[in-house]
Amino acid sequence: MSSGKNLRIALVQMQVGSDKKVNLKHAEDLIRATVAKNKPDLVCLPEFFNAPYETHLFATYAETIPDGETCKFLSTLAKELKVQLVGGSIPEKDGKNLYNTCTFWSAKGELLSKHRKVHLFDVDIPNIVTYKESAALSYGKHLSYADVTSGVKAGFGICFDIQFPEMWIKYREIGCNLMIIPSAFPLKYGDLWWELYLRARAVDTQSFVTMISPARDVNGNYVAHGYTMMIDPFGKVIASAKEGEEVVVIDLDFSLVEKARKEVKLFEMRRPDLFELTVKSGQTF
Ligand SMILES: NC(=O)CCC(=O)C(=O)O
């Protein structure tokens, strides 16, 4: 549907269980249905869409990229349906190291970008959440971004990455205008911070920003918040799922990015004579 700077995007808030094959089949069914019905240009899946988000299970479910089962699945489906896919994230195995990794696939099934989560989720907040992702995973070392269509450049992050504004400021400087963040906030953390962080990053960068969550499953061991959302460059919520399984489809008009950036010239008014931000490690490939 898209031409120029408009993009139809489908955000798949899916139930994720403990059986990888069932998760892949379920993702496939939802993607096929939304492609048939809505003809999106880009479909995005949530963090850990193929496996439970539980640190003691990461090694069991981990796969290599790009030749593991899940990557083959994503590549084949993108090619067959002629749709770009953001493969949420999966546990990746590379030698002795494990990562939380997001892949982005072209409509020809080519791997265009790979983002390894840069900020691992290590928190201990009494009565809210205790989680130590770094006990199982290694840190990503790169920013990752890619062209989605002419005039649309996506910057990728995974969940906790959203809490670190400097990363997103840098993506804006690099030319990104759409920030894509597969995520799985735990319940109480989500109630406090989910929408706030999304809207903050949208106004910081004057870009579209989305987080894509698994559906909430109150019987699971790690209960994700849900509320997959898209925010516009002015910080307004323009689409939101609720808690259960849902596919959100929305058309993004990138002239809004130009409007926001023209009205308030944030990046022209910065003070590099006082502060500067330098990327020490760039894109993975
Ligand atoms: N999966 C995660 O990284 C959770 C991060 C989170 O809850 C946050 O607040 O950020």
Image (tube, rainbow, N blue to C red):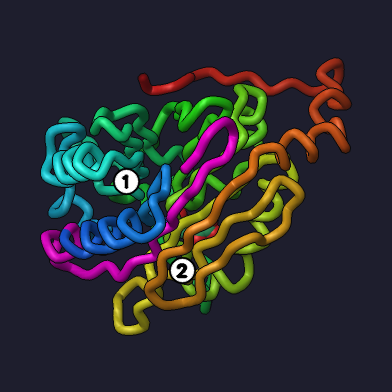
The residue under the point 48% across, 59% down is: 249
> In the rendered view, would you say 110 is above or below 83?
above
Q: Position of residue 47 (x, y in %)?
A: 37, 54
Give the residue type that dot 2 points to. Answer: Pro
Element marked by disc 1? loop
Which residue is located at x 46 percent, y 32 percent?
A: 148
Instruction: Indicate whether residue 15 is drawn in magenta.
Output: yes
Above or below, comparing residue 231 to residue 147 in the picture? below
Residue at image coords 53%, 30%? 153
Name the side, left or right, on which 161 lies relative to 284.
right
Q: Which residue is mark 1?
A: 87
> What amino acid type should be assigned to the residue bearing mark 1?
Gly
Q: Nearer the viewer, residue 121 or 92?
A: 92
Q: Which residues are magenta?
A: 1-24
Queried on whether the Cβ of the residue with tag 2 lies below 8 angstroms from ligand 1, the answer reads yes
* Residue that mark 2 sits on: 186
x 65%, y 38%: residue: 254
Along the viewing direction, whichever of 79 and 172 lies nearer the viewer: 79
Q: Examine the image and state in which quarter residue 36 appears.
A: bottom left
Q: Earlier in the sequence, mark 2 or mark 1?
A: 1
In the rendered view of the protein, which quadrant contains the C terminus? top left
Residue 135: numbered disc = none
x and y, in percent, of residue 61 in the image = 16, 53
Instruction: Decide if ligand 1 comes within 8 Å of the CB at mark 1.
Output: no
Percent of width and height locating residue 228? 50, 63
